[in-house]
Image (tube, helix red, strand yellow):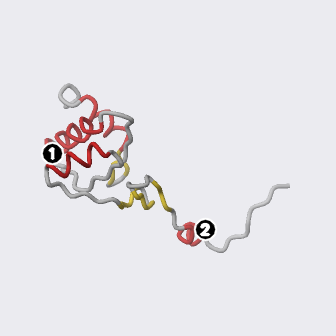
Amino acid sequence: MYHDTYPGACALVDRSNYMDGFAASASHDNDIIFFEVTSLMNTIHLPMYKWATNSTHLHDIWRTQSLPLQTERQVLGMDWDTQPDTIHIDHTDIAGATGNKAPSTTS
């Protein structure tokens, strides 16, 4: 329905939505992606509230528009620090999820 108006955003939303989150990456045109995805989601009455990026260009745009800028955000269950562009995973969460099961072996 909106593929003609927001072609890039529709493709990203189709392949980058995860439950109640959206995670995508791009090597260029971050500002175009941001504005197109924001416009699409507002059009369909699903506004996006939490944005994070390591793009300094997009940070500058957000500052001029007084949009919130956070350098640490949780993405797909991992902590992402956008300044050094690093992801932190709490290994105790992973270990706790596996329980006390014995390691599997093969014969």
Q: Secondary structure at mark 2?
A: helix
Q: Is residue 81 left or right of residue 51?
A: right
- The location of residue 34, given as percent across then percent down, is 24, 41
Residue at position x 52%, y 67% in the image: 90
The answer to the question of whether label 1 and label 2 lie on touching residues, with beta carbons closer than 8 A, is no
Quadrant assignment, res 3: top left
* Label 1 sits on residue: 42
Q: Can the viewer see residue 1 in this picture?
A: no
User: What kind of residue is marked 1?
Assistant: Asn
Tell me which label, 1 or 2, sits earlier in the chain.
1
* Label 2 sits on residue: 98
Residue at position x 13%, y 50% in the image: 65
Quadrant in which the C terminus appears: bottom right
Q: How many marks?
A: 2
User: What kind of residue is marked 2?
Assistant: Thr
- The location of residue 72, given as percent across then percent down, is 36, 61
Residue at position x 38%, y 61% in the image: 74
Disc 2 residue crowd, few under 14, some 14–19, many 20+, Cα 10 Å = few
Residue ranking furthest to the right:
107
Q: Is residue 105 left or right of residue 22?
A: right
Disc 1 residue crowd, few under 14, some 14–19, many 20+, Cα 10 Å = few
Residue ranking furthest to the top:
4
